[in-house]
Image (cartoon, rainbow, N blue to C red):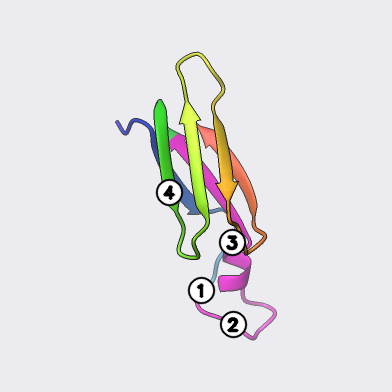
Amino acid sequence: MLHGKIIPVFDSQIDTLVKETRHDINGWDQANSSIKIIFHGEGKDEYTLWDGTRIICEKIKGTEGNCRVINDTAGRSYQFEFR
């Protein structure tokens, strides 16, 4: 079991991870617009995404846990889940 680890995942339907020009294909722009952050275990972890966005999460036993997002220039939406 992982303890105190951030696991970022795309949380939308993705057809390709390259730039697309067709409206019927979900590509990089759609994938990069929303990310689900899963924090596994207890403790503290920090993760830097490909564009420099920093995610810092912490969960202490008996608490709900919290995360902060720093320097998000992409304007993504984030969903946080603690396991």
State the residue at coordinates (51%, 46%): 55
Q: Residues within 10 Å of mark 1 (few under 14, many from 20)?
A: some
Q: Which residue is mark 3?
A: 13
Taking the image as drawn, is residue 56 in sight?
yes
Dot 1: element:
loop
Which of marks 1 and 4 precedes in the sequence? 1
Tag of residue 20: 2
Can residue 83 be seen here? The reply is: no
- Distance of mark 4 from mark 1, alpha carbons? 24 Å
Binning the other alpha carbons within 10 Å of mark 4 as few (below 14), some (14 to 19) or many (20 upward) gives some
Secondary element at tag 2? loop
Comparing labels 4 and 1, the label whose residue is closer to the camera: 4
The three-letter amino acid code for the residue at tag 3 is: Gln
Q: Position of residue 6 (x, y in %)?
A: 42, 42
Q: Indicate the secondary structure of the residue bearing disc 4.
A: strand
The residue wearing badge 1 is 16
The kind of secondary structure element at disc 3 is loop
Circle nearer the viewer, 4 or 2? 4
Circle 4 is placed at which residue position?
A: 47
